[in-house]
Amino acid sequence: MAPQVLVNNSAKYRGMYVATRSFKDKDVVVSGSDMVKVYNEAQKQGIAEPVISYVPKKNASHK
């Protein structure tokens, strides 16, 4: 099974929270280290229900 891409240019956002317009839209509109600030900034940009994701750091392990 091929890996799922959640956001475009994910390497650029490692260790950060990102906001996209929807689950289908993979373009990041806001990023940062504080999830609440990312969410609020996305709403200020007119996105009523932004999708917030965390992009793990490169060497993060899955347990």
Image (cartoon, rainbow, N blue to C red):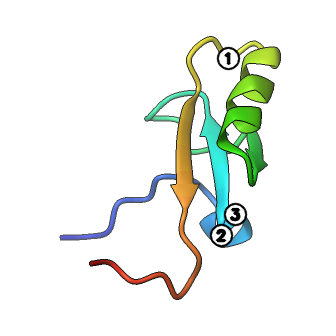
- Three-letter code for the amino acid on which mark 2 is drawn: Arg
Residue farthest to the bottom? Answer: 59
Mark 1, secondary structure of its residue: loop
Residues at marks 3 and 1, CA–CA distance in whole angstroms: 20 Å
Left or right placement of residue 49 versus residue 61 in this view = right
Numbered disc 3: secondary structure: helix
Tag 2 or tag 1, which sits nearer the N-term?
Answer: 2
Q: State the residue in front, 63 or 41.
A: 63
Q: Earlier in the sequence, mark 3 or mark 1?
A: 3
Residue 8 vs 22, above or below: the answer is below
Q: Position of residue 24 (x, y in %)?
A: 45, 35
Residue at 47% in and 52% down: 6
Horizontal and vertical percent for residue 10? 61, 65
x then y, percent, for residue 43: 73, 18
Instruction: Please report contact status of discs 3 and 2: CB closer than 8 Å, yes or no.
Output: yes
Could you classify mark 1 by the number of other residues whose Cα lies within 10 Å: few (under 14), some (14-19), or many (20 or more)? some
Q: Which residue is mark 2?
A: 14
Quadrant, the C terminus: bottom left
Residue picked out by circle 3 = 13
Q: Identify whether 21 is placed above or below 54.
A: above
Q: Which residue is mark 1?
A: 47
Residues marked 3 and 1 touching at CB (< 8 Å)? no
Amino acid, disc 3:
Tyr
Residue 38, above or below 16: above
Please give the name of the residue rendered at 35% of the width and 60% of the height, measured from the top-left corner: 4
Looking at this view, is 30 or 40 the one in front?
40
State the CA–CA distance, disc 1 to disc 2.
23 Å
The crowd level at tag 2 (other Cα within 10 Å; few <14, some 14-19, many 20+) is some
